[in-house]
Image (spheres, rainbow, N blue to C red):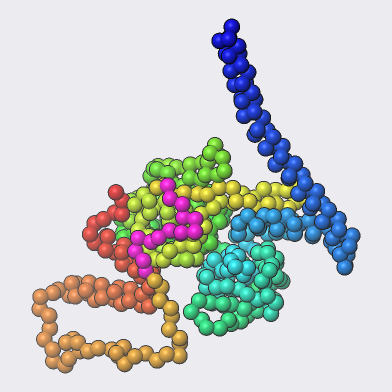
């Protein structure tokens, strides 16, 4: 009987413990919910007091939008509220044409930081560089403004002037830059040849990027007489601020036969996604060099990281920007939208580039151009050789065709030297492709 009672007592005690373990999370959840409702009541109380007692009449719609934006921007630099106008502008930008200065910006230490100027835009032509800080717009400080508010101040009618104050690393004092606003028409991909290499300059990842890249590459290959006539491809992603994830995946897939391109991982494990390459390589195994710098961000880093991890490309330049998060744009009532960071992305090897960037395989700095006022050094005078001497002996070991070929090669080398002065990083990339072609490499495992 005692044993039975003890067993019964034990059962009752165990049941009590189980009941407590189940009830504790429920109580904690109810407590958290109660706290949330109290905070929402506090917000409503403050809103009513501001609306009724502030020294001037307030626009309640703007007040609520500011509160929403404050909540989102407190999360990270890339989450924000988009007013109906901002949401519409964003949709226009992804289609590749919009009005403005032509710069991609983020926020750091309360100031606006330039991620990169876009090729051929007013900001690019005015000399704005990646890493510049914009502290004032038309003489008014942007400190304390949200990123959207600062961007709004930089917007204006096409043809109007704006003066921005810039702080640049390596420059002792802030300086003003005058820019004339213009309609920004982005050409997603520009293609050209350097010697026997095809250079694909990708400026943004919008709806047009992959189709532009595919058609541009095919045109250049045809112009050179076929894929066998090229040494390789330079994929220039410098100062490319990113854009659509779907386009980054398509561009990466264009040069990969198989394997993972990128994966995304959100708050919940089940929300993660993996994107894999499909068979087919537009370059048909030809070597690729990817150029990046501090203005290469987001989608650019996805492409560079994927091709680097698969040993499909040699990455050259300087460390990229380091934006390793994915934003989802969610439509809201009233035609507004919410841009919310919903996941991080990872390269095929499983690395996150968030705040670290993609490190190039070969670090190559782009030398700053010397001021035009500097006079060339005396050492740059044309040199004399045996061929310049009167009465010199002729070369009897080479035919006229062989001599002609040597002179053509020398001319190409001089063109490369000129390119090195104009764009050292690009010249370096072309030299790598030329070296691989000479050695018979194809840039793949």
Q: Is residue 417 above or below residue 329?
A: below
Residue 114 on image: x %, y %: 56, 69
From the viewer's perspective, is residue 388 above or below residue 1?
A: below
Total count of labels: 0
Is residue 161 in view? no
Q: Horizontal and vertical percent for residue 137? A: 67, 75
- Taking the spot 51% from the left edge, 45% from the top edge, the residue there is 264
Choose between 429 and 18: the one closer to the eye: 18
* Res 117 → quadrant: bottom right
Q: Give x and y (percent) for residue 250.
A: 48, 49
Q: Taking 58 as reference, is 164 above or below it?
A: below
The picture quadrant where one finds residue 193 is: bottom left
Magenta segment: 350-364
Query: Of residues 355 and 360, which is closer to you in this image?
Result: 355
Direction from residue 298 to residue 430 in the image, left or right: left
Residue 160 x %, y %: 70, 76
Residue at x 52% of width, y 57% of height:
323
Residue 349 visible in the current orientation? yes
């Amino acid at each position: 009987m005692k044993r039975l009672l003890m067993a019964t007592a034990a059962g009752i005690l165990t049941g009590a413990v189980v009941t407590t373990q189940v009830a504790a999370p429920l109580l904690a959840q109810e407590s958290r919910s109660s706290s949330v409702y109290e905070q929402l009541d506090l917000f409503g109380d403050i809103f009513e007091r501001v609306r009724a007692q502030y020294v001037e009449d307030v626009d309640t719609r703007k007040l609520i939008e500011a509160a929403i934006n404050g909540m989102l921007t407190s999360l990270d630099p890339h989450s924000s509220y988009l007013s109906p106008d901002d949401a519409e502008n964003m949709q226009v930008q992804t289609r590749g044409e919009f009005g403005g200065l032509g710069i991609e910006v983020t926020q750091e230490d309360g100031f606006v930081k330039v991620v990169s100027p876009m090729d051929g835009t007013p900001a690019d032509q005015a000399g704005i560089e990646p890493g510049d800080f914009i502290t004032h717009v038309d003489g008014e400080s942007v400190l304390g403004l949200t990123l959207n508010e600062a961007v709004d101040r930089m917007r204006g009618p096409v043809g109007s002037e704006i003066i921005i104050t810039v702080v640049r690393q390596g420059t002792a004092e802030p300086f003003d830059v005058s820019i004339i606003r213009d309609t920004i028409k982005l050409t997603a991909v520009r293609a050209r040849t350097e010697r026997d290499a095809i250079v694909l300059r990708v400026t943004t990842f919008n709806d047009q990027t992959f189709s532009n890249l595919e058609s541009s590459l095919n045109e250049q290959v045809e112009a050179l007489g076929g894929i066998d006539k090229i040494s390789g491809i330079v994929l220039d992603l410098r100062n490319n601020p990113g854009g659509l994830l779907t386009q980054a995946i398509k561009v990466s897939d264009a040069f990969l036969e198989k394997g993972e391109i990128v994966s995304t991982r959100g708050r919940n494990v089940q929300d993660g996604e993996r994107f894999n390459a499909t068979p087919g390589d537009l370059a048909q195994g030809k070597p690729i060099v990817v150029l990046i710098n501090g203005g290469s961000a987001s989608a650019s880093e996805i492409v560079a990281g994927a091709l680097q991890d698969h040993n499909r490309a040699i990455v050259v330049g300087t460390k990229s920007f380091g934006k390793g998060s994915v934003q989802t744009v969610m439509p809201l009532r009233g035609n507004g939208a919410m841009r919310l960071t919903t996941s991080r992305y990872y390269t095929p090897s499983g690395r996150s580039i968030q705040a670290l960037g993609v490190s190039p395989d070969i670090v190559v700095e782009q030398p700053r151009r010397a001021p035009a006022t500097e006079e060339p050094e005396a050492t740059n005078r044309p040199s004399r050789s045996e061929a310049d001497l009167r009465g010199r002996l002729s070369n009897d070991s080479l035919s006229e065709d062989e001599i002609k070929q040597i002179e053509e090669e020398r001319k190409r080398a001089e063109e490369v030297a000129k390119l090195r002065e104009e764009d050292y990083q690009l010249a370096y990339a072309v030299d790598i492709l030329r070296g691989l072609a000479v050695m018979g490499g194809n840039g793949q495992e």
